Amino acid sequence: MRTPVIDNLQYARFSPRIFAQMREGGVDAVHVTIAYHESFREMVLNLEQWNRWFETHPDLIFRGTTAADVVHAQETNRTAIFFGFQNPSPIEDDIGLVEICHQLGVRFMQLTYNNQSLLATGCYEDDDTGLTRMGRQVVKEMNRVGMVVDMSHSAERSTLEAIEHSTRPIAITHANPHWWHAALRNKSDAVLRALTGSGGMLGFSVYPHHLAGGTGCTLESFCGMIAEAAERYGARHLGIGTDLCQDQPDSVVEWMRVGRWSKVIDYGEGSATNAGFPPMPSWFADNRDFGNIRNGLLAVGLSEDDVNGIMGGNWHRFYSESFGPA
């Protein structure tokens, strides 16, 4: 059986059209965001929506909870959908909800979005105080039940402390190296060396604010960056996490950045000119374009084995090692 194609982060406005595009693009598994600032109950409502989609489109998608589901998706020509949070809001202040959320199918949780949380510091805060007391306890609980610690939006010290404190490899599901593009959300060489050196995974993002050149970023530049990252950190620790926000209205950006904590709009990235979703690069508009990334990686000289790993094989291995109890 061929190596799977896995996108380890999307927050699209999902629909039957997008599910069909996943199949056209040969995407075997997608990690989807089901919570930003939602409470536990609000997150459950999002799960209800996904259950309706699974019921009405069983020929296209089904809920994934284990690495074996990726293989099942390939065998049945469908896409396995894995759930994750981009904020710990759904666990509220209750560590017991970590296990409950895992039982509901959640496999990834960011310890922060952009702000300080009860667990750690987000990347837009001025002062990074690292993991909190609750944060250390929650990481331990996530390790126990098999929920992956995700530090995609977290600040430097907090990320390094999460890597050190976690007894299982963690993930940065959607970001790029800061040495390629100095966006606040991209990650330093020190973080990426610590991440990959401990067996963790980095998913490369195609969200334009994370790309050198933004919307105008070329496929060659993006794939050249991945090739350099493979030299620095080892190709087996790399994958794709596009951060695809397809079909989302611009009002969703306000929800992502502001939630309920502020009366004024904070778009992040240091500038209000980033209001709304930027146009995607020409070589990646939707799930049908993963072949462009594969071809681009081969064109910059990566081996077929390394490309297969980056396109999904590495995430599949990580799933098999991470989603069960310790």
Image: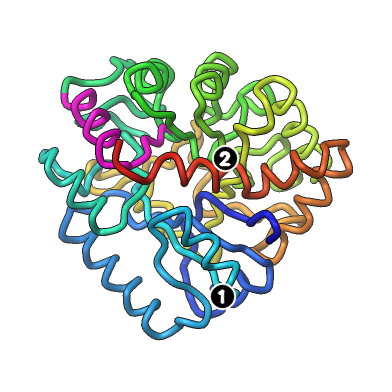
Image position, residue 232 (x, y; %) = 70, 20
Instruction: Identify which residue is drawn at 60% across, 42% down.
Output: 314
Instruction: Identify which residue is drawn at 62% across, 35% down.
Output: 238
Report the quarter where the C terminus lies: top left
Residue 146 falls within the magenta-colored stretch: yes
Name the disc covering residue 225, or none: none
Instruction: Identify which residue is drawn at 29% across, 66% down.
Output: 46
User: Label 1: how many residues lie within 10 Å, few (<14), some (14-19) or many (20+)?
Assistant: few
Name the disc covering residue 203, or none: 2
Image height check: is 47 above or below 152? below
User: Label 2: how many residues lie within 10 Å, few (<14), some (14-19) or many (20+)?
Assistant: many
Query: Label 1: which residue?
Result: 76
Instruction: Identify which residue is drawn at 41% across, 40% down.
Output: 322
Going by the numbered disc 2, the residue's amino acid type is Gly
Image height check: is 308 above or below 186? below
What is the magenta range? 134-151
Residue 291: quarter of image: bottom right
Of helix, strand and loop, which one carries label 1? helix
Depth check, mark 2 against mark 1: the one in front is 1
Nearer-N-terminus badge (2/1): 1
Is residue 15 at all visible to an observer of this figure?
yes
